[in-house]
Amino acid sequence: MPPLLVAANGRPNAAIPVSGIGLIQLPLFELPVSRTIMKRKRNQTLMDGKVQGHNGVSAEAPIALLTPYTLGKFQLSHRVVLAPLTRQRSWNNVPQPHAILYYSQRTTKGGLLIAEATGVSDTAQGYPQTLGIWTKEQVEAWKPIVDAVNAKGSIFFCQIWHVGRGSNTGFQPDGQAPISCTDKLLPPQTRSNGIDVAHFSTPRRLTTEEIPQVVNDFRLAARNAIEDGFDGVEIHGAHGYLLNQFMKDQVNDRTDKYGGSLENRCRFPLEVVEAIVDEIGADKVRIRLSPFANYSEAGDSNPEALGLYMVESLNKYRLVYCHMVEPRMKTVVEKYESPHSLLP
């Protein structure tokens, strides 16, 4: 079966479902692909939806990306998906009316859109003017945006996140320290535009007793998204943000039940998943993971074991899908040759 392709800035992102998770052959989650997605027959070229042979004879051939796909309970009319893209165009973390045009322009009947990363609480922010979904004002501002997408017949998911230590006191309520699984400072990072440099504050290590509150922040954000009319949520568990910080042993140096062993490091992300599934239903939940990536110095000594453990643990929840990032994507701007692949 041909894949779904998540389109980001005109190039393949870590795409989603194909047929089982590459190195992790499992029935529930399906494979991201960010490579050639249409197989061409020998000596043939695909042109305008037709297979053009060298003898000049052409025949109708379906373009794989434009064929329907069943994704859980959702019926997609094609396989091109809008990836979550950090737009940074809100005001005080409140969505603005121009987002109605932005998302509706990218909407097609039966298409799938994933909204930009959206903060779950006032401690979740780490970029200027990113969106939130934890206050009544934010929830109300999202509604006309979601309505515009729904009116065109698209399926719309909200990606919810918490940046963790990828922040500084200027983004935090009352100038407090960012929260994380650790108190290790993240060095300055060049942003994806290759120009801006982000500076971070020393994070505060969450106490064991505080972690359930953060789990609850994710749960409430998911509930707010459904109230807004979103079809579901994508939990951002990748790219060095809070959930990823807990998973990765390069960052997580805890000695309580949320640190040390692989099972302990994955405990918090899985508690978030369970809380959201209990709140809105597994058929409205998916998650993004990047076990091999090293975004924001969040690497792991055994990424293959981490990926396997997370997917095997997630299988019992029967999520819509798992959005995986290819092993060759090491950072935002860096690719490298990897012996690992998500392909079967």
Image (tube, rainbow, N blue to C red):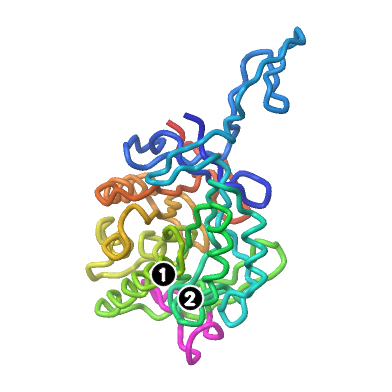
- Where is residue 275 shown, x and y percent of the image? 28, 65
Q: Residue at x 46, y 82 (%)?
A: 136
The residue labelled by disc 2 is 139
Q: Which residue is drawn at 42% across and 68% down?
A: 242
Could you tell whether 95 is left or right of 105 in the image?
A: left
Could you tell whether 66 is left or right of 339 in the image?
A: right
Give the magenta part as a residue range: 168-185
Please check the rendered image and state whether residue 296 is part of the magenta-colored stretch, yes or no: no
How many other residues sit within 10 Å of disc 2, few (<14), some (14-19) or many (≥20)?
Answer: some
Q: Residue at x 64, y 13 (%)?
A: 42
Q: In this view, does 237 lie above or below 76?
A: below
Nearer the observer, 84 or 185: 84
- Where is residue 282 shown, x and y percent of the image? 31, 54
Taking the view exactly as shown, the residue that stands out farthest to the front is: 151
Q: Is residue 237 visible to us here?
A: no
Taking the view exactly as shown, the residue that stands out farthest to the left is: 257
The quarter holding residue 123 reads bottom left
Badge 2 vs badge 1, beta-carbon distance below 8 Å = yes
Could you tell whether 208 is left or right of 117 in the image?
A: left
The residue labelled by disc 1 is 227
Q: Which amino acid does label 1 sit on?
A: Glu
- Where is residue 130 shown, x and y percent of the image? 57, 73
Local secondary structure at mark 1: helix
Which of the image's four quarters has the C terminus? Answer: top left
How many other residues sit within 10 Å of disc 1, few (<14), some (14-19) or many (≥20)?
Answer: some
Please check the rendered image and state whether residue 174 is part of the magenta-colored stretch, yes or no: yes
